[in-house]
Amino acid sequence: MSKQDWTTQTDLRSQLQRFWDKGELLRTRLPHAAALFPLQLRLKKPNSQDLGNNFEQVRHWINQLQQLDKRYRLAWKEINHRQLGRNHIPDQVWVEQVEDALGLLGQRRAAQQFDQLVANTLDDFPELLPWLEKYPLLTLDHAPGWHKVLAVLHWFRKHPHSGLYLRQLDIAGVDTKFIEQRRGLLGKLLDLVLPAGYIDEQWRGADGFTRRYGLQDKPLRVRLRILDSKLAIAGLTDLELPVEQLARLHLPVEKVFVTENEINALAFPDQPGAILLFGQGYALNTLGQIPWLSQQALYYWGDIDTHGFAILNRLRYYLPHAQSLLMDTATLLHHHEMWGQEPEDKRCTSELPLLTDSEQELYQALRDNKIYTPDERQGYAFSRGSAETSCGAGTGCIPDRQPVKNLRFEQEHVRFSWLLSHLPA
């Protein structure tokens, strides 16, 4: 073994540091924790051949280990060398107690702080022991505000289904911002300490925090334009309403358009018996709360990119009869000079089962980079499987072109004349 491979004081400390970084040293301090100490550290040491070939270097290595902090314990081994006779070299390194390991790492004070956090937590929330076992370092990271975390847990356990706004919570020493900034952490802890009946399981994640734990959420609002002046409400055609009020709104509507881009929505042409809803993005479950939308012709106009089709697919979970508008090959190819690029790390690559056959074909061509650059002689082409098929010129030839990587066409670039000529009757 090369002398460079022999364990040094730095190596031993690094081994202990890894135990700290994994939370093992703190975990041993919890009730019913598995024993970790005495802890044997890995020791790469010289062999008998090294003793003969590099005797001075071996002796220097031994001297270095003999200078180790006394909180390391060396176990020795006798080597009988035919030329050098009997020699003793370090064979094992042990750390007897967790306090020794913490002292060697300079983490005793942090461990004592963790002990206090654990005691304060388990006094009132013994059900959090598994969480403390899993996330000891995360608990320590939150030490400065942990008393506030516990105060929040107490409040929610005493006030189920309060129906209050987050701003209305009266918890001593805890402001709204503290809760808002720690919704992820608090949600994980509340799931463990609250009875099942206190939790609304249909709401998840940071965005669903308030409703999940019985608070009143900011009302979901939908913006709409009334595209038929005959349907105006007190002369108003541009409105933003809470979704609950919109669900109760009864207008003699025949068609509903849904889009994302605000400017497109504001410039959308008037249509008899029609309204337009916009600005929902992926929050399309909002529209699913409006029962009368299921009774009207519904058209979704989004970007021609992977996320545009993902939003369309999501909309159909709530409103299966929704149709796409200007999200087709003809629209894409007609505006080829306005093609852009979707960021690589933002693209959707999921299966979208609720698309129609033609939508699915275009989505997969976008997703798999199978749409090719336009060519005057050959037209526009995209690949279906392994065969290349011309789209536009109808030549049937195999294009000698490179695919457009991460292609996207944003709806804001659709020519107004194209929109007017493709609106449903």
Image (cartoon, rainbow, N blue to C red):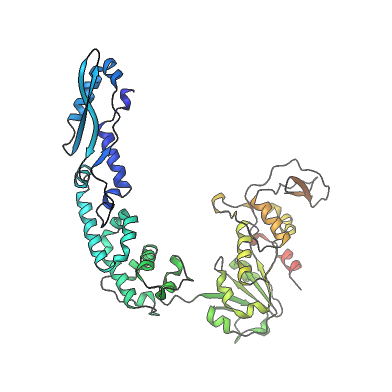
Q: What residue is at 29 percent from the left and 46 percent from the top?
A: 20
Q: Quadrant of the N terminus?
A: top left
Total marks drawn? Answer: 0
Q: Residue at left 19%, top 51%? A: 109
Q: Is residue 83 above or below residue 94?
A: above
Task: Identify which residue, 64 or 371, lies in the foreground.
Answer: 64
Q: Residue at x 39, y 77 (%)?
A: 165
Across and down, in percent, residue 267 comes to 64, 70
- Report x, y in % for residue 113: 22, 56
Q: Nearer the viewer, residue 413 or 359?
A: 359
Q: Is residue 309 visible?
A: yes
Q: Is residue 244 above or below residue 401?
A: below
Farthest residue, direction right: 395
Q: Is residue 169 left or right of residue 324?
A: left
Q: Is residue 91 left or right of residue 270?
A: left
Image coordinates for residue 11, horizontal then vertical, percent = 28, 34
* Quarter-of-image position of residue 71: top left
Residue at 20% across, 33% down: 74
Residue 56 drawn at (x, y percent): 23, 18
Q: Residue furthest left?
A: 70
| Left/right of residue 399 with respect to residue 21 in the rendered view | right
Asked whether 352 or 124 is in front, the reply is 124
User: Is there any visible trace of residue 227 in the rendered image?
Assistant: no
For this orientation, the residue located farthest to the bottom is 234
Q: Is residue 259 left or right of residue 117?
A: right
Quadrant where the image shows the C terminus? bottom right
